[in-house]
Amino acid sequence: MPDNYNNPIGVFDSGVGGLSVLRAIRAQIPQQPVLYLADQVHVPYGPRPLTEVQAFSEQITRFLLANGAKLIVVACNTASAAALTHLRKTFQSVSFVGMEPAIKPAAEQTRSGVVGVLATPATFQGALYASVVERFAQGVTVLQDACPGLVGQIEKGELDSIETESILRAALAPMLAKGIDTVVLGCTHYPFVIPLIKLIVGEYVRVIDPAPAVARQTRRLLEPGLMPESVNEVTDIVYYSTGSAAAMQGLLQKLMGETGMVKELHWNNGQLAK
Ligand code: DGL
């Protein structure tokens, strides 16, 4: 048994989106301590060049590993698109779990043959998205929308405001008109607006949140000897934000229904420091 099996896993996102993944991880692996890092000073990642997001992701990974993380969950589609291949090459002894848009289950389940994907501009530009569509969506029409402004709304905790609703209606109405029966959430922020999405698309359109599948994959990678022992221990979660700790605390309450200890981090010459 490796001696780091009780160590935390590192989970990161540009902001609070990765909390939708953290929620699923905690439901499936409640005994697993976590370091959660939100790079809120740089949110949103979506409109940024892939090279910049890659540099942020590498430094965040270095920070999480230096603080004891035994496995890294890239709980951000944009960072996965920009950096996953690079991270696996750079940190060869580390296991990574990344996000990829759930085009495969959508293509398998659609009956109308038309699916909609909501993600960020960088995710749509990355090679990962093109390859997933190419491999799994043969014969299926895939419509996409980058939902400009939606990540910002969720970062403000505006899950059901008029502005949030109008961004979603602008994305979904043309897709509905073309006959989608499935919506893929290709950004980890978006599961927090599932109630609003369901209100717009109605009960016959399926909404796919990949977080439970990502949590299952995390569990699979921990199972060979890296799983903490006790299921009764209180889960230890440390939250870090490169933005305001107070704002992050408010969002934890709003999105997760709990209070959490948030520590502020700062970028200094391209590196993260406490
Ligand atoms: N939550 C992220 C994603 O899954 C990033 C969104 C953003 O920062 O633009 O893509």
Image (tube, rainbow, N blue to C red):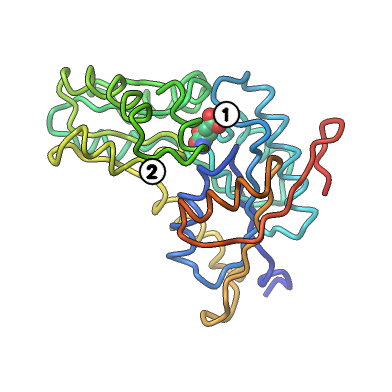
**Residue 237 position in % (x across, y down):** 62, 63
Q: Quadrant of residue 116?
A: top left
Q: Tell me the element at label 2.
A: helix
Kindly identify the amino acid type of the residue bearing the numbered disc 1.
Answer: Pro
Q: Is mark 1 within 8 Å of ligand 1?
A: yes
Residue assigned mark 1: 44
Q: Is mark 2 within 8 Å of ligand 1?
A: no
How many numbered marks appear? 2
Question: Viewer-proximal residue, 161 or 181?
Answer: 161
* CA distance separating discs 1 and 2: 16 Å
Residue shown at 27% from the left, 40% from the top: 207
**Residue 35 position in % (x across, y down):** 66, 57
Residue assigned mark 2: 191
Can residue 250 be seen by looking at this rendering? yes
Q: Identify the image quadrant of the N terminus.
A: bottom right
Q: Tell me the element at label 1.
A: loop
Residue 34 vertical position relative to residue 41 in the rendered view, above or below:
below
Residue 3 vertical position relative to residue 179 in the rendered view, above or below:
below
**Residue 146 position in % (x across, y down):** 42, 22
Q: Quadrant of residue 171?
A: top left
Can residue 77 be seen by looking at this rendering? no
In-image side of 5 versus 233 (left or right): right
Do residues under tags 1 and 2 come within 8 Å of each other at their CB atoms? no
Q: Quadrant of residue 148?
A: top left
